[in-house]
Image (cartoon, coloured by chain):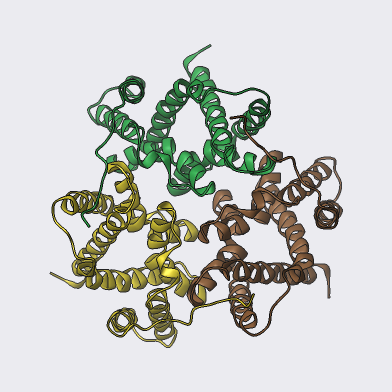
Chain colours: A yellow, B green, C brown
Amino acid sequence: MNIETLLYTIGIAAVAVNASSGVLEAGRRPFDLFGMVVVALAAALGGGTLRDVMLDRTVFWIADQTYLIAAIVAGMATFTLVRLVRLPTKLFLLPDAIGLALFTVSGTQAALSVGAPWLVASLMGVVTGVFGGILRDMLCNEVPLVFSGELYATASWAGALLLVGLVVAGVGAGWAALAGGGLVLVIRLGAIVFGWRLPVFTARK
Amino acid sequence: MNIETLLYTIGIAAVAVNASSGVLEAGRRPFDLFGMVVVALAAALGGGTLRDVMLDRTVFWIADQTYLIAAIVAGMATFTLVRLVRLPTKLFLLPDAIGLALFTVSGTQAALSVGAPWLVASLMGVVTGVFGGILRDMLCNEVPLVFSGELYATASWAGALLLVGLVVAGVGAGWAALAGGGLVLVIRLGAIVFGWRLPVFTARK
Amino acid sequence: MNIETLLYTIGIAAVAVNASSGVLEAGRRPFDLFGMVVVALAAALGGGTLRDVMLDRTVFWIADQTYLIAAIVAGMATFTLVRLVRLPTKLFLLPDAIGLALFTVSGTQAALSVGAPWLVASLMGVVTGVFGGILRDMLCNEVPLVFSGELYATASWAGALLLVGLVVAGVGAGWAALAGGGLVLVIRLGAIVFGWRLPVFTARK
């Protein structure tokens, strides 16, 4: 298996993991199978879709519907599984962190490839990584989880900025992606293990 | 009146009916006239707009503002009417079902015409048919109705898949549209009359 | 300083003011720094982004990331300030009204420049002016403020329609923009001072 095939496979896996997280999140609501599938699709494909629409690229799952099929299958499988057995939420933390790293890298690279400025490119990495989760929570009528709690979007942004900085500094795309993605993973896993957080805002009344 | 004119007229009517449903839904909230118009526009035009943006087509109501005018007029008329008389909600069920069938067919055909793969094309039919209602509920800060209750999106998806299958099988576009739209209508009306539902998800705690 | 530079500077200022209003609004929620930045970006850039995506133009802050930097800096500065001193909400009313006028004018002109029909063009002015605020409230899981209260979107729409009418009547683009933007400002400030409102909708039960 070469590197391209490996990255493609991880991309499909990241989409599937996000679809599962969408179903687990929506599970608190009395949604039917269709509602579940919509939330799963929004969580899995929302970030990349927003990125592609804003960058005026062909939406990735319209160009290759394997992503769409992976999201639907993973969503339905999770829907079935959670009715049979109790899945520990922590089961998803590691694949989700890998997915965040991969989405961040692919989103940043996609933006750089169409000539986006550096700050925009890094933000597109974050959008790809976290917007799906924000959309999932909006559909469930909840305040997005990613706006508080352990470092998540911050891990994504730090990695995206490192990637952009290395590319600007002349480092090869492959090494920059590895370093950027690695930083996302290290910060996110550190945040899970050690409870790293950003300061929470409270306005003076 | 030829078939093209008939379809166009039904399309305008479907937009108007969805705008009215938006106003009826928003009626539970203390919105002013502008808020009503926004919810009416979101309900009537949201699905087709998302489809066109994702497929990178010209947004249908920007290309032909008759749709926009129909939505505004229908929204304002409903706004006025509901302050004068009490409209039975059930009044809208039949035109809404016809609108769902038509939106599903037009959305699926639009996606097929730009070469989208089969599953994507069927999903675009569903997006066109139901996203307006999801957006309407999100603006009203409510959990989308379409995620539970009698079959709605499922009717749309079944019809869209039938349409795509018939086109792939070599059936003419007109007959495929008639069969697909007819199936949406039959399932949706059956769901209203007989209370057909999908199983509701409840996660094990 | 010529007129183009002035308009550009006001545009940047309008983005910054909207970013600040996003942070002030989100301040009621226990968001962290990243959550604040997202809400600030949504409030500041959301309207123009939706306009550009629907008109199939290059998104303005992707083409020129000065807007993005202004929004992030203003958001973070407000985040810091509100933890130190208590900012009176009314402080933002005048710059916000100027921003609404400018966003309305720039949105309407952008739509006219790509050949949008008159009603669509005026609506794009409104979308540019008010969608950021709607998105901000949706992210905070609240019913959008702009759907009720003192005239806001109505001021935007009135000015946009005047601008389009003057352009159609053959008045120069500069004068039309001045008149349209002026009308937005006059109605909005009048609404703040005199409490002008649209009738609120209440459906008969």
Q: Position of residue C171 (x, y in %)?
A: 86, 47
Where, by quadrant of the figure, is residue B176 drawn? top left
- Count of numbered marks: 0
Q: Position of residue C7 (x, y in %)?
A: 77, 67
Q: Is residue B127 visible in this depiction of the protein? A: yes
Q: Nearer the viewer, residue A184 or B78?
A: B78
A86 relative to C196 in the view: left or right? left
A70 relative to C45 in the view: left or right? left
For image coordinates 54% across by 46% down, the residue present is: B140
Q: Which residue sits furthest bottom?
A: A169
Q: Is residue C62 visible in this depiction of the protein? A: no
Q: Position of residue B6 (x, y in %)?
A: 50, 17
The answer to whether residue B34 is above or below residue B167 is below
Q: Which residue sits furthest top?
A: B1
Q: Nearer the viewer, residue B97 or A105?
A: B97
The answer to whether residue A141 is above or below residue B181 is below
Quick one: quadrant of the C terminus of chain B?
bottom left
For image coordinates 58% across by 30% down, the residue present is: C205
The answer to whether residue A92 is above or below residue B7 is below
Q: Position of residue C94 (x, y in %)?
A: 79, 66
The answer to whether residue C192 is above or below residue C198 is below
